[in-house]
Amino acid sequence: LDFRQAGILLARMYEEDKDERYLDSMAELCESLIDYPKNSKGGFWHMKSQPNQMWLDGLYMVAPLCAKYAVLSGKKEFAYITLKQASLMYDNMCDKKNNLLYHGWDDSFEAEWADKTTGLSQEKWGRALGWFTTALADIIEILGVKFIGIEKNVSDLKAVLESIVNYQTENGFWCQVVDKPQEKGNWEETSGTCLIAYSLAKAVRLGLLDEKYLHYAKKAYEAVVNSLVENDIGEVIIQGICSGTCIEEGTYEHYINCKTVENDLHGSGAFLLMCAEMNLL
């Protein structure tokens, strides 16, 4: 699913100059999903090489694109595909104790990391949760809060965001493993923090959350901005970004031992999204 994400840029290009080639390219990316491999409940595999596995990352990679294609093409079925993918993740990957979602789910129970009873991975990774909330907020904005059938998705997003603020650190960040901020070895991670701040800010702007939740978004925004440094030639350096990672064995140790990088696109892209949304407010 990952390579499809950049297709969302085609929508902006089509809206600006109405060149049908952009819409045709979106059609190729979206309509090919009809035959894309799915698990027993209809959820997209994250990769064809990883049968039956759904990762939270995947919602951001494909759902806003499909939602936008549905609006531009008039093919509402792609909106419902989008909403179904989000609902499958929430319904099957959410820990009902705290309304936060695990990174992965394998309904065949065959993945190395999959619990043999639930099919879930072990931990709640910050950037994956950020991708999920960002995607859901974008979908709701694209389709509109009055779109028939979207009520559940709005409720799901609110439930996650209202919970996740309880795990923000005193410094304003969210940690690599979100719901264990006090656990030994856990650390404050920048990209996930930016994406969660973006989601909170957008949810407030769209009227999905009370304005009191803007406090958490502002706190995160200020924390990240204050953590920026400049190198010797005046370039801005974004620090504390988790490098690209898969679920691997899915353990707590796996996530906290991930390398940190500077100005990685996972972090700089999330930072720009956060800044843009905060600017709208």
Image (cartoon, helix red, strand yellow):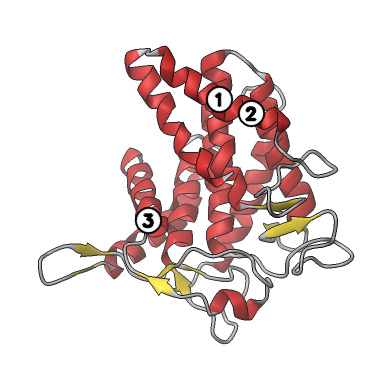
Residue at disc 2, secondary structure = helix
Residues 119 and 192: in front is 119
User: Is residue 144 in view?
Assistant: no
Q: Residue at x 70, y 28 (%)?
A: 34
* Residue 136 shown left or right of residue 17 in the figure: right
Residue assigned mark 3: 265
Q: Is residue 198 shown above or below 164? A: above
Q: Amino acid at mark 1?
A: Glu
Q: Secondary structure at mark 3?
A: helix
In x, y percent, where is residue 121?
73, 65
Q: Is residue 229 above or below residue 49?
A: below
Give the label on residue 32, or none: 2
For badge 2, the amino acid type reads Ser
**Residue drawn at (32%, 15%), measured in percent from left and top?**
17
Using a 10 Å C-alpha cutoff, classify the residue at mark 1 as few (fewer than 14 neighbours), some (14 to 19) or many (20 or more). Answer: few
Marking on residue 28 = 1
Q: Quadrant of the C terminus?
A: top left
Disc 2 residue crowd, few under 14, some 14–19, many 20+, Cα 10 Å: few
